[in-house]
Image (cartoon, helix red, strand yellow):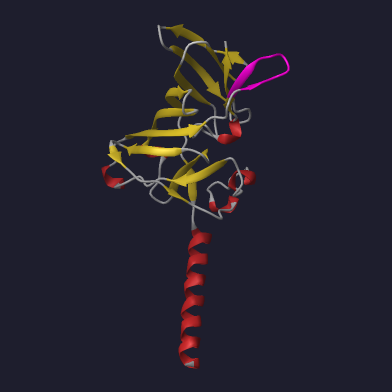
Amino acid sequence: MRRMIFLLLAILACAIGLRAAEADSLDFKLLAAETYSLDMFYSSELQRMYVQLDFDIPKSALSPDYRYGAFLDADAVFQSIEVAGNYENHYRVKNLEPENFAPPQPQAAWLDEKAPARFFGLPLGDWQSLPQKVHFRFWYYTSVDPFTTDSRGVASTGLEPDRFWYPRNTGAASTVQLKLTTTPYMVLRIGENSVTRTDSQYSRVHETTFTENPAEPVALRLIRD
């Protein structure tokens, strides 16, 4: 009996050691694009933001030697992910350290379990079959806080930068093309700038193109007009 217990403990120790070695050897890279296209819809009834995100990355900027992923709002729920036209699953990775990234992730706070965003890994499928320009498309939704009224009587809600309301480029400036559909009587602000809007009978469409600076990521705010 003692011998059996010893063998079981030895096997468990080996397994734990193997898992630790695998975790230490992980090299993740963040997906980073030059241009992002966001087509969004805000549901007042459900207090949700629905997002279709599209971006391209040259295959030459990717490597089969790394595992890729991105940060996204912890409340986000994926409905679908496509990589080069093929549906892919995502996976969550816990207990990551800055050293698990190449280059090391500069914001260790992003990896905290209580952070408002989470890192998710994304398989790239069959590397050999990837085209020279790899197209990514994410469909997801995330919760938006109820509107609150400030001391001036202005009611607003929104998504702060630390929630990573889209998987932004954290290493270089990028161009973001954004279209958001809401009910009428709402104003959209990206950072400090109000967005041009077009009204129809039952909806309002907000469209803008802006530059996202990694050092000064922007918030998205909805204000009742």
| Rendering quarter of residue 141 | top left
| Front residue of this view, candidates 70 and 131 | 70
Figure disc tally: 0
Residues shaded magenta: 148-157
154 is within the stretch colored magenta: yes
Residue 58: % across, % down: 38, 34
| Front residue of this view, candidates 40 and 25 | 40
Determine the residue positioned at 48% across, 29% down. 48
153 is within the stretch colored magenta: yes
Which residue is most to the front?
45
Residue 129: % across, % down: 26, 43
| Rendering quarter of residue 162 | top right
Q: Is residue 153 above or below residue 144?
A: above
| Front residue of this view, candidates 129 and 97 | 97
Determine the residue positioned at 43% across, 23% down. 41
Residue 21: % across, % down: 51, 66
